[in-house]
Image (spheres, rainbow, N blue to C red):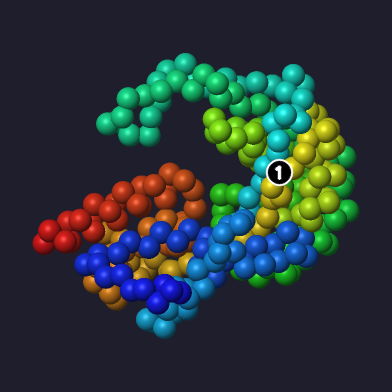
Amino acid sequence: VKSGLEFSSPTVILTNGTFLNGKIYIGKTTYSAGRAGELASIGLAENLKELGFKVGRLNTCTPPRIDRRTVDFPKMKEQKSADIPLSFSFENKGKIYKDFSVFMTRTNQKTHQIIQDNIHRVPLSNGTIQSAAIRYCPSVEDKIIRFPEKESHQIFLEPEGYNTEEIYLQGFFTSLPADTQQEALHTIVGLENCKIIRYGYAIEYDIIYPNQLKYSLETKAIKGLFLAGQVNGTSGYEEAAEQGLLAGINAVQLTRG
């Protein structure tokens, strides 16, 4: 690490997500980061290259987070949480999330026009970003360009948690400039007066080509080194969680011989 400390372990699992040589884009604004507010892993990315790993580069987007206190929820369609207990693991007791409704609204022609008028300022569209985009998180700009016949696109307002006022705008992934993000959102029903807490952004990052891994997710080149999640070029919370579980189980098995 940068402090000079060294850590040793018979097995290591890297779950770097978007942090390897991560670079954030918001319009023409760009800076090094693993995600907003956190440092990118530069040294580790370079070290993996020096060790001979073949490295690629991908990009994805995240939506803006808005203040729930500035949203006009009665104008939107509510989708209540399931009335049956839910849990990620069969070993845990399920929970009913009755205080977490999701609300749905849609973009419209005014929204689309603002985005089209500013498409030259979008790094994913103007050629600034040359890396490949992951398949599962198309930006709102991309949807408008690829499907011009669509009059609107769905947006789901998802609460971030119990202890925050932040709302995640699922379906509005974007790297538009900050001013355009605000202008576009104000054209949407229920978001006319919304305030952005954190702007959406595109992020570009290094990945390790997964053909360098065994089925256990251990690297073929270095015994005891496992990779899991987006560092393998995958996307999605479920995929990352499953890979983490698999890598963890196999790392323990390896230490036990």
- The one of 131 and 247 positioned closer to us in this rendering: 247
- Residue 157 location, x and y as percent? 65, 33
Query: Where's the C terminus, which quadrant?
Result: bottom left
Label 1: few (<14), some (14–19) or many (≥20) C-alpha neighbours in 10 Å: some
Q: Is residue 204 visible?
A: no
- Type of amino acid at the residue the image marks with label 1: Ile
Q: Is residue 44 visible?
A: yes
Indicate whether 224 appears above or below 182. below
Query: Where's the N terminus, which quadrant?
Result: bottom left
Residue 152 falls in which quadrant of the image? top right
Q: Residue at x 79, y 48 (%)?
A: 181
Secondary structure of the residue carrying tag 1 is strand
Indicate whether 16 appears above or below 183. below
- Residue 39 location, x and y as percent? 56, 64
Residue beneath label 1, please?
A: 197
Q: Residue at x 42, y 48 (%)?
A: 239
Residue 254 falls in which quadrant of the image? bottom left
